[in-house]
Amino acid sequence: MTDEVLLTARDIRRDFRVSAGFGRRMRTVSAVCGVSLDVKRGGVLGIVGESGCGKSTLAKIILGLDAPTGGEVLFQGRSLTEMDRKERARHIQPIFQDPYLSLNPRKRIDTIIGLPLRVAGMREGEIRQRVRDMMDLTGLPTRLAGAYPSQMSGGQRQRVAIARALISRPELVVCDEPTSALDVSIQAQILNLLQDLRRELGLTYVLISHNLAVVEHIATEVMVMNHGEVIEHRATEDLFAAPASAYTQMLLDSILTPEPDKGLPDISFTEA
Ligand SMILES: Nc1ncnc2c1ncn2[C@@H]1O[C@H](COP(=O)(O)OP(=O)(O)OP(=O)(O)O)[C@@H](O)[C@H]1O
């Protein structure tokens, strides 16, 4: 990780107007309440917190897929609002939780992976080569190029989603629960792949996860959220060694308390 700040979010707010029920008045839900953060080039910022604390809303705002009701996001000093969709996509790409939902079931794998390059207007010959290289890099056998998402396993589908996200060589990848929909036995493979790709391609990640074991292993910094606010944001080692807040301590305690008969999650990582 370097000290260069790739992305800055300043005082982000996101309010939603929601109906309070049949015949009732509208009320405001504040999903994100004044969050500021810096993402440093080459690092992994883990964002953790319980369900509903605002992680995914913040991720969508960082990706430019949703507009904040207050504050601004700067990528290399430029506001995301100054960039069009194509330019944003060149710099920042998402990897979502469920690869099945995020892949078009009617398209072949090679078409899905190459789509960002086609949108950018690249020549077909070059696209084919880049797709082959990216399949190789993400551990997808080339014989799967003509397959459809329904013919693949969950892990393979997530590899396709990763290949598609990385093919336009973005600098920042926002991973929103990238392994939560996968079998436990596959989760570690995908996390190890993400780690290898980060080193090989010099990527920066924002990693949203409710799984603190995953975040502890991968993130260089961790930001803890609760009710739309930042509770603490520190280097991973420091946070796990001595959490500064009772809320973080409660989250840490909850991963150390296995569910009856299930034991702790069996995720084994390869060492860096
Ligand atoms: N489009 C929306 N309309 C209304 N309320 C919303 C909308 N999106 C999110 N919210 C509300 O904002 C709050 C934060 O939601 P968000 O999905 O960001 O949390 P999260 O931490 O990602 O949760 P999870 O881990 O369950 O995905 C929740 O109370 C949610 O109901």
Image: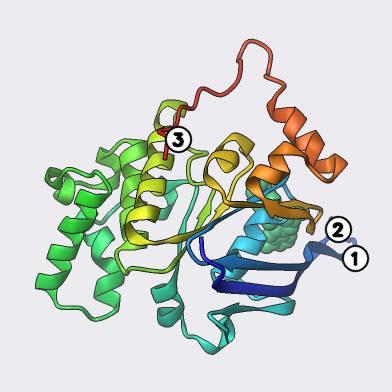
Q: Do the residues labelled 1 and 3 touch (CB within 8 Å)?
A: no
Callout 3: SS: loop
Which residue bears the numbered disc 3? 182
Image quadrant of residue 241?
Answer: top right
**Image quadrant containing the C terminus:** top left
- Most extreme residue toward the top is 261
The residue depicted at 24 percent of the width and 47 percent of the height is 148
Which residue bears the numbered disc 2? 20
Q: Is residue 165 visible?
A: yes
Q: Distance between the residues labelled 1 and 3?
A: 40 Å
The residue depicted at 27 percent of the width and 54 percent of the height is 106
Callout 3 amino acid: Leu
Callout 2 amino acid: Ala
Is 261 above or below relative to 200?
above
Coordinates of residue 190 in the picture (x, y in percent): 39, 40
Is 138 above or below relative to 173?
above
Q: Do the residues labelled 2 and 1 touch (CB within 8 Å)?
A: yes
Local crowd at mark 3 within 10 Å, few (<14), some, or many (≥20)? some
Q: In this view, does 222 lie to the left or right of 130?
A: right
Is 83 above or below relative to 50?
below
Mark closer to the observer (1, 3): 3
Q: Can residue 103 be seen in this view?
A: no
Which residue bears the numbered disc 1? 25
Callout 1 amino acid: Arg
Local crowd at mark 1 within 10 Å, few (<14), some, or many (≥20)? few
Q: How far apart are marks 2 and 1 (CA)?
A: 6 Å
Callout 2: SS: loop
Coordinates of residue 161 in the picture (x, y in percent): 36, 53
The residue depicted at 66 percent of the width and 63 percent of the height is 58
Local crowd at mark 2 within 10 Å, few (<14), some, or many (≥20)? few
